[in-house]
Amino acid sequence: MVGQRLIKWARTRSPWLLHFNSGSCNGCDIEIVAALTPRYDLERFGAIVKGSPRHADVLLATGPVTRQTAARLKRIYEQMAEPKFVVAVGTCATSGGVFSGLYNILGGIDQAIPVDAYVLGCAAKPEAIIDGVAKLLAKLKGT
Amino acid sequence: MVSTFKVPIGPQHPALKEPSNFTFDVEGEYVVNVTPRVGYNHRGIEKACENRTYLQDIYLIERICGICSHAHTTTFCQAVEECGGIQAPPRGIYLRTLVAELNRIHSHLLWLGVAGHEVGWDTLLMYVWRDREVVMEILEMLTGNRVNYAINTIGGVRRDITPEQARKLTKALNILEDRTKHYRNLCLGEKTLLSRAIGVGVLKPNVARSLCAVGPTLRASGIKSDVRRDDPYAAYDVTPFEVITSDMCDVAGRVVVRVDETLQSVNICRWLLENLPSGDIRTKLTRRIPPNEVVSRIEAPRGELIHFVRSNGTDKPDRVKVRAPTLGNILAVCEMLKGGYIADIPIVLAAIDPCFSCTDRMLFVDSKNDKNWIWSNEDLKRYSTKFYAKESLPGRR
Amino acid sequence: MSEEKRAPTEQKKAPLPKIEPQEIESQKIENENSMVEEIKKFLGEDLIEAKVQRPRRIYLKVKPGAHRKTIQFMKDNWGLYHISTISGLDLGDNLEVVFHLNARNVAVNVRAEVPRNKPKIETITDLLPGSNLYEREVHDLFGIEFKGHPNLERLELPEDWPKGVYPLRKDWKAPE
């Protein structure tokens, strides 16, 4: 029991992030990188961006999911180890945004993989991204 | 020269079910040939533009690229205004140009941080992006958003600048100029960056010309070609500025060109603020645009951006064709990578300032030794840092 | 870059001159007009239409097949080396290819129509190597074949997109 609580404490104190762009305009992606820079500093939550899906706990996904990236997105999600969480950053990742209905678009991250948190905005501001990650951690702590 | 020789890679290779952005034919440490794959961001925008009105199209066009979004709307609005036969009022044109130059500053500073990150110098990324927040705050103050400003509309701009905002902008420009000069001295004096940048990714002028490269990639090969000077639009025919070129033809030249262009942009913003005319910021345009076709070219931060708009008398365009500047540089970057080390790939790719997705996957094919493998961007960066750490002499770092 | 220096106080009152003053316009159109005359002499019957829309914009319509010698002429006489892009158009009965070129700081747009049921046109990649990707894009989205192109493969559409379906043609509607 103590072991379980310790593990949960460790997980919520140091979420390792993986960032994936599924065809977005790069607006939300630069705001995610800006969230890691000194002004907003996401790293004070213990978050760090890793390159490999095998090391990450949280997938930050942007973009309305083009057909070419859909298979890769699913593969990356499968490669992540449990427990894993997905945060859809930006309006495009939530619903397709301005691109919803276009012929090469699936229409949001949740059309390909299950999503735990949605961060809205076009582009989502760094403060909103931090809020989204913090709310996700609070939800994890509560469970 | 390796001829088109397809290596038979079967489905049993687990890593190869995912498509890769680049395929490199290698021999040992050297890259022999590069095959790019673009199209991951193909969303079908050109087709969608035909089903939406001109005003709705602005919001779609803006999101072609989030980093140079203002460039896309400027080109599109200019094209539609020309189709309709009107011109935005002078104050609107000056404000459009002002936001365009602020966009250029933000884009070049972003690039400088990313270039630092690609050579493994994350400190530069953190410092530069901290200073980039100055221009992001200004853009939010002027336009209401940090990214995707939505300040352009057909017939002019949507928001005016107050004297209080102009004062804050002047102060911010002074800070930006200071910090950019500091980064210029830093980048040109810092041996670790120079050893990764000088002589790397060489693009000779005649090759750049024949492959039709655009933007700072072209200007860093000594060719004085800038749409703001050659085909003036907005307020650029009255604004004093210099076209920055460099004879170095390599990554270091591209760093110099971009940093100096940032300093030029600061001066342009100052001039525009001092000489801002009074008056309206917007002219009204009819919903239906008479049949016409217009080619609109501007100098986006990454290079020449061209829109071709055809109107047909209704309130929806007949055809909107967009060619983003990165597409013009892809052939040039493939040429630059040939003959170089594998370890140079990240910085050479970053030096054309591409709008690729962040998790690139690259396929390496060594046909001589009969190997092939897939690396992600992170794997490649780690390899590069280790490679150059081996290269440098002990005690030099 | 010679504009008169204005004192700060008086310049807020006086409106600035129009961005394209009439005097400079007429001078510049002379340059474009002389370029059009040259190309008319060279092409003769192959030139269907020539239009100077405004300073720095020329539109030429040529017979399909004559676009190559037009581009060669521009390379030899006007110092052409830069192609901005190639657009495809769906005109209803026919498809059209527009080459957006840049010579002497004038945007010269050369267009050629191809029949809808047989959309084939010669490539220009040997004349302008930079047009490689642009021709692939037009082929991908419109189905126009560029004869002689070294590798006319998919550029933008996904690999599992059905062959023979060209989304940017007017008769293709996105499935709901």
Image (spheres, helix red, strand yellow):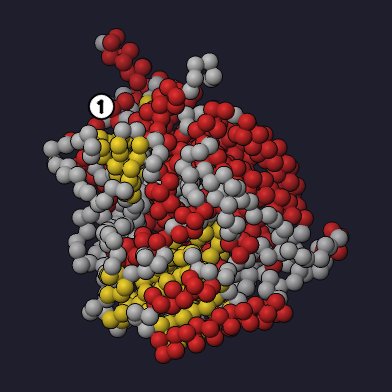
Q: Quadrant of the C terminus of chain A?
A: top left
Give the residue at mark 1: A81
Classify residue A7 by image quadrant: top left
* Residue B324: percent from left, percent from top: 45, 58
Q: Nearer the viewer, residue B96 or B199?
A: B199
| Amino acid type, label 1 | Ala
Q: Position of residue B327 (x, y in %)?
A: 42, 56
Which residue is situated farthest in the bottom direction here? C45
Furthest residue in direction top, as rendered: A2
Is residue C60 at all visible to an observer of this figure? yes
Front-lying residue, C122 or A136: C122
**Relative image position of residue B163 (x, y in whole percent):** 75, 52
Q: Is B335 left, or right, of B159 in this rendering?
A: left
* Residue B170 percent coordinates (x, y): 74, 46
* Image point (33%, 46%), residue name: B34
- Helix, strand or loop at label 1? It is loop
* Residue depicted at 34% across the width and 30% down the height: B379
Q: Nearer the viewer, residue B82 or B145?
A: B82
Q: Report the residue at 81% width, 65% height from top.
A: C4
Residue B172 or residue B16, whichever sits in front:
B16
Does B310 appear above or below B322? below
- Which quadrant is home to the N terminus of chain A? top left
Residue B318 occupies quadrant: bottom left
Residue at (67%, 40%) from the top-left corner?
B176
| Above or below, comparing residue A87 to residue B269 in the picture | above
Q: Is residue B98 left or right of residue B388?
A: right
